[in-house]
Image: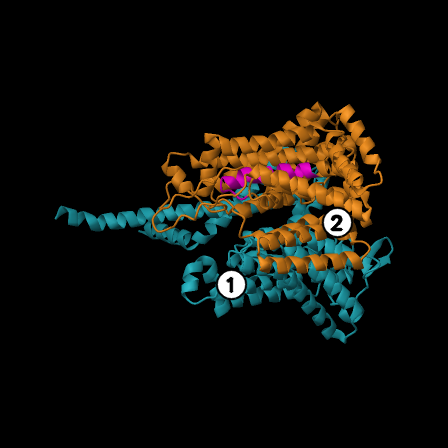
Amino acid sequence: MIWLSALRLVLATVKKWGPLRAPVLAVVFAAVLCAVVLLFSGANPFSAFGAMIAQVREGQVAVDIVNSTAIYMLAALAAAIGFHMNLLNIGIEGQYRVGAVVAAIVGGAVVLPGVLHWLVILVVAALAGALWALLPAVLKVTRGVHEVISTIMMNAIAFGLAAFLIRRDQFGVLVGNNVTTDPIPPSGQVPGIDLGSRGTVFGLVFLAVAAAAVYAVVMDRTRFGFELKASGLSPTAAAAGGVNAKKMIMVSLLVSGAVAGLVGMPEILGRDHAYTLNFAQGYGFAGIGIALLGRNHPLGIAFGSLLWAFLEKAKGALDNEGVPKEIATIMQGAIVLSVVVAYEIVKRMDLVAEQRRVGRATAAVVEPEAVK
Amino acid sequence: MSVVDVQPTPSGMTMAPPPRTRKYPGWLIFTIGTIGAVLVLALTSELTGEHALTSSSTMQNTITLGLPILLCGLGGIWSERSGMINIGLEGMMILGTWGAAFGGYHWGPWMAVVTGAICGALGGALHAVATVTFGVNHIVSGVAINLLGAGVTKYLSTLIFQPISNNPRDSPPIEQFDTFSSPGLSDSLLRMEKDRGNSSVQGMASDVAGLVRGLVTGVSPMLIIGILLVIATYVVLWRTPFGLRLRSCGENPVAAESLGVNVYFHKYMAVVASGALAGIAGAALVLGSSPSIYQEGQTANRGFIGLAAMIFGNWRPGGTLAGAGLFGYADGLRLSATPEAVHALLYSAFIVAGALVLWQLYRRKLRTVFFAAIGAVLVYALYYFTDELPEQFLPYTPHIITLVVLALAAQRLRPPATDGMPYRRGEGD
């Protein structure tokens, strides 16, 4: 009897943890894939992973990971807002670049007291990001242009705009060998948490946490979040329920753009204090991958960002193991692909199981009648 | 290209859209468009004195830079005609650049094309497995493949090229194709290009000669391959049973399935061919750069521009060729011309807008005339009051043109009916 109840308990647990099957499958698959690649390049996967984990304790790596996690979280949240509506905002890359360069120019030009200064910069960044998403949104709503194509084009144009704006006859100044915008005065800089030789945690790490919290509340507890998710799950049902699809597209793309505009802020207000020529790129596409990884869930996104940041910052250790550190990018891509494939597989398994269950149930009902 | 598309079979409640017929055959539109573009450029060059617009070196740069875009666009046609969106073209192209450098270093330029195609096809196969077999969202899979393509090539070039070239970001230079010119034609065209004469007709003739000379001088076999692939794409997709079946998978896979078409097989073929074409595009990029090497970040989003060229061309080979020519020209002009010459392009835009005004007046579409006239005035004002365009925006001309085309003509474009939609065997209604 004890065995039977134990078995029941295990079965119940498996059922309860059903949602975790897909991520576990994905992680196992991705880990196997990475291990194969590592073996192929002649390294021991276990010692390579071990070296990466040991790397976290070195110098500023841990703090770097925390800072990057915050940046990735913002990018992934921006992507997730669109994903809920089945909108693929590929334009985060351009939106955060425009947000960063415009905010840096404004921040360097205005003089305001303390907190107000960086609050203004943040608002400007969000507005600029939203503005860069405005054209794709308008084209989508009025002309039916697919947002993926228009945002890809806007991404490229954003690079041109940024390069133009920091030309020295526009807003650029020459600092050493680097062209930057006017530095943001100390009143506009966000103080971080100084950990001495370990580095400085950006103050705006808390912005990312706050954004994730707001995102969770809005999605689960407000009418807007409900309408957003409903429109994504079934546009026809949502329209029948009185949701204005066009308005939802506009709002969600603009909000997504506004959040994307903030992606560059932790680095600019916390470390660089200006937009420089070698401003980081690639956060937008990373954000899309992480949002897929985290299935648009705030905790999933936080975890995904941490994983991404870990791979990115700890990959230096691989060079000592005789493995090109670029393998980290392969791992990131492999993980994203494994996750989406794993979710599809699990979805199909559930569907088949459901069909069998329904089939058995209806057969049981039908059979006695047939006997009669 | 005059073939009318397969219309989705009316099933149940859905109505078949009215068949779209074209007034003029595609080749005629293409020819008139090409002649028109050449005339506009010649006129601009004659009136503004910016002869770099029509120099043969500009034309050669156009070909070199337009070829990768063209091949990517063809790849897009193959994939999207079967109903599979392929945002991963960029990643497959990156794989192609690496493959071409590897094959070219070991076995010469012809093998560079082959290995580039193989590497791209591998990327395409991965996309096909994810999207066709596992039903992953096409765009999601494409984004992942772009990440993966960049990662794999970075990794492989560190592993394999660094010991030879001492640089993890570059490959060693590979052997280039021998180019050939038609000696008599090229020389006489050169004389014509140099001698602008006194009359504006002779000047314009020398502009045309410059453009044609760019086309027939220093021709790389890559150009021949590209043109052959355009024709092959058209013939295979629009003139064979295989192509009909492949396109029917993109228009109405359920109907195709009911007629006994193996939809999965055709989608697989299409996506793998798409990857191979993107890989050849990568090879064209490697062989076209001087020195011919693989470089990290070399593709610079040309895969996306290829997609844009495909959309510009309304998912057809001839239109894609025109789009690739336009975008290649915008890119090529940046290399060979001064900012003033680029500025003169505004004058071309003014001529085009003016021609549009006249044409729409003839057709009595007054509303369009009104907007076109405003556009013409604005462009002319911009031309008149500025001396040069900020060069930072020049590389992004294709992107801006694409947005304008999409904004103005999105309703007239006709993508395959079930482009990007999930399909599973036996689940049709």
Q: Nearer the viewer, residue A310 or B400?
A: B400
Amino acid on which disc 1 is placed: Lys
Q: Quadrant of residue A352?
A: top left
Circle nearer the viewer, 1 or 2: 2
Where is the N terminus of chain B found, in terms of image quarters? top right
Q: Which chain is cyan?
A: A
The residue tagged 1 is A246
**Left or right: residue A162 compared with residue B76:** right
Amino acid on which disc 2 is placed: Leu
Specify the farthest residue to the right.
A176
Rendered residue at 50%/38% (across/down): B129
> Could you say where residue B115 lies in the image, as x and y percent from the top left?
64, 28
Q: Is residue A45 above or below residue A363?
A: above
> Could you say where residue A46 lies in the image, as x and y percent from the top left?
62, 40
Query: Disc 1 on helix, strand or loop?
Result: helix
> Could you say where residue B371 lies in the image, as x and y percent from the top left?
63, 59
Q: Is residue B73 magenta?
A: yes
Q: Nearer the viewer, residue B223 or B162?
A: B223
Q: Which residues are magenta?
A: B66-85
Q: Colour of chain B?
A: orange
Q: Chain of mark 1?
A: A
Q: Is residue B186 above or below residue B138?
A: above
**Left or right: residue B388 compared with residue B426:** right
The residue tagged 2 is B345
Q: Are marks 1 and 2 in contact (CB under 8 Å)?
A: no
Q: Quadrant of residue B102?
A: top right
Query: Disc 2 on helix, strand or loop?
Result: helix
Q: Nearer the viewer, residue A332 or A168?
A: A168
**Left or right: residue A35 compared with residue B132:** right
